[in-house]
Image: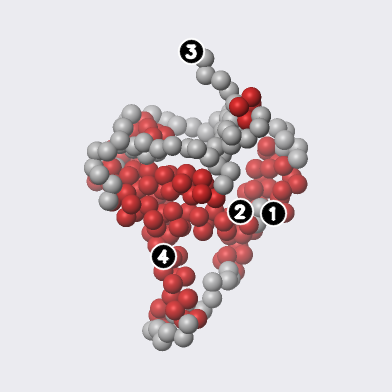
Amino acid sequence: WSPEMLTEDIDVSWKLQLRSWDIRFEPRALVWILMPETLIGLWKQRLRWAMGGIQTLGKYFPLFFVWRCRRMWPVYLEFLISVMWAYLMSAAVILWGLGALGVNLPRWLWVDTLLPGFNGLLIGVTCMCQIGLSLLFDSRYDHKLSRVYSWMIWYPVAYWVLNTATTIWAVPKTMMRKRGSRGRWTSPDRGAHMPGAQAAAPKAEA
């Protein structure tokens, strides 16, 4: 364990894979977790995740130059590109806003609209197909899941907006973080205060 990491699961999984261990997906595994129930709680959780991702990028940057670590290069690149994507998307929103306010921008900086075109439609259809398959697979555990399918088109929109915002804020916040400080965090908003939540939560035994 690395005590300075804010997302220890990413750090541990990368360490294992860099030492030639395999981490595989088990579709039959069942897990139980309490999730944030307020926007503030969700923001804090995703900001910590984003900061942990930035920490991981910085910590494992040298693996880009080690041939024996080549199987992790695609994972690292995907992580890095997602951070770059967040900043490019925010730049597009700012440029669109400046154009809407009448600022005279060079043509190569002009953003006509934020509405999705054909590419956005294709991504949306692909996302709905993926979510549909997920609900189908999980229906054996909860047959009521299909009721929420019509609302799922908004999930990627909310997810991308939240991830973009937390990533943009996480980069400078992580860079200003004191080197070597312990990765401590609290989760006050995990539903444990709700009636019946304590009874439903698994109890640790001594």
Gap between marks 1 and 2 measured at Cα: 8 Å
Q: CA distance from mark 1 to mark 4?
A: 27 Å
Residue nearest the viewer, comparing 47 with 129? 47
Q: CA distance from mark 3 to mark 2?
A: 40 Å
Instruction: Residue 43: give x, y in percent of width and height.
Output: 49, 49
Assign a secondary structure to mark 4: helix
Q: In the rendered image, which residue does mark 3 sit on?
A: 206
- Mark number for residue 155? 2
Residue 77 percent across, percent down from the top left = 37, 51
The reply to whether callout 1 and callout 2 are in contact (CB within 8 Å) is yes
Q: Is residue 39 visible?
A: yes
Residue 116 % position (x, y)? 58, 69
The amino acid type found where label 1 is placed reads Trp
The answer to which of marks 2 and 4 sits earlier in the sequence is 4
Q: Amino acid at mark 3?
A: Ala
Residue 124 to residue 24: above or below = below
**Residue ID at (55%, 50%):** 39
Residue 50 % position (x, y) = 41, 48
Badge number at residue 126: none
Give the residue drawn at x 60%, y 62%: 122
| Category of crowding for the residue at label 3, using alpha-carbon neighbours closer than 10 angstroms: few (below 14), some (14–19), many (at least 20) | few
Mark 4 residue type? Leu
Which numbered tag is attached to residue 88?
4
Give the SS element for disc 3: loop
Task: Provide the residue designation for mark 1.
Answer: 151
Say if mark 2 contacts mark 4, CB within 8 Å: no
